[in-house]
Image (cartoon, rainbow, N blue to C red):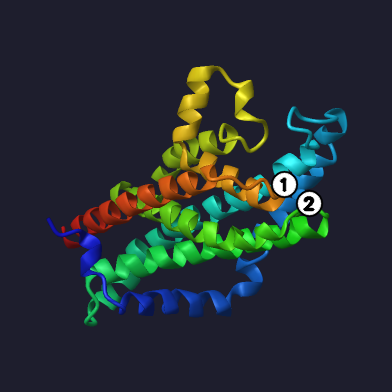
Amino acid sequence: MQLPMTRVTYRAIRVWQRDLDTFLRLWKTESWWPTIEPLLYLSSLGFGLGVYITRLSNGLSFLEFIAPAFVATTAMFAASFECMFSSFVRMEFQRTFDAILATPLTIEEVIAGEILWGMTRGVFAAVSVLFVISLFGLVHSPWALLTPLVAVVEGLMFASVAMIITAIVPAIDAFNYYITLGITPMFLFSAVFFPLDRLPQIAQTIAWVSPLTHAVYVQRSLILGQISWNLVWSVLWIAFLALIAFNVSLVLMRRRLIK
């Protein structure tokens, strides 16, 4: 059976380029939140709650523990929101997809271009947060230079999942279900704010299924210089989920756009 992704050609990059051009015209209002939001978290949790937490079991301060996780979480939020709200607006309200489909591009190429742009927004966000935490002296290893590559895989995965949600929601308000039941639980229980070994065993098992848990684990390890072969398996798990979600999103978006 032929995978839907095999129908995507180089022309998908034109959709990505179109979204990039739009972003560059609006960058003053579009690019500030990936930097400001982590600053708020670091200030309130790291310098607030962190004052009452001396050292974690792994010897890290609370601030050193949570800061690298925001590289992963911000990439998740940026990629997800771009391929949910922004893509939905382009599809349903602006009818941008209809206009692009009047060109030689196929549905798969349009959706692939959107997903690639969502991935790019995730990478932009991850790099922004990495820059911010480096100013606080929280980057401890040159391995941190690999974090944008991990953000590429993570961003592709979350952008693809978000596009699946976009394909099935009846209205833009329905995104709140995925945010509340999907993104928020991952944000709270994927080792962002506390080590997973503090959870019951069954909760730890469920948490390790979450792709965000693996993204946080890899980014934290790279930034702190805690390198092991387990990082490869975590990246492969995220890549596997990205492959599945990417193909499913192409199928579901085709059904939505041709009905």
- Quick one: SS at disc 2? loop
Quarter that holds the N terminus:
bottom left
- Residue at far left of view: 1
Are the residues at dot 2 and dot 1 in contact (C-beta closer than 8 Å)?
yes
Q: Position of residue 139 (x, y in %)?
A: 75, 54
Q: Residue at x 73, y 62 (%)?
A: 131
**Residue 161 location (% of width, % of height):** 38, 49
Give the image location of residue 195, x and y in percent. 65, 30
Amino acid type shown at disc 1: Ala
Residue 106: name its quadrant: bottom left
The residue to which callout 1 is attached is 67
Return the disc, 2 or 1, that comes first in the chain's sequence: 1
Q: Quadrant of the C terminus?
A: bottom left
Identify whether 226 is placed above or below 102: above
Q: Is residue 70 left or right of residue 40?
A: left
Residue at (17% x, 62% y) in the render: 258
Mark 2: amino acid: Leu
On screen, residue 66 versus residue 206, left or right, reads right
Residue 226 vs residue 82, the one in the foreground: 226
Residue 197 x, y percent position in the rendering: 61, 24
- Relative horizontal placement of residue 189, taking residue 66 as reference (left or right): left
Please tell me which residue is depicted at 30% across the width and 50% down the height of the picture.
244
Find residue 42 and name its label.
none
Q: Residue 138 shows which numbered tag?
A: 2
203 and 91: which is toward the camera: 203
Q: Residue extending furthest front? A: 229
Q: Residue at x 67, y 58 (%)?
A: 144
Report whether residue 94 is seen: no
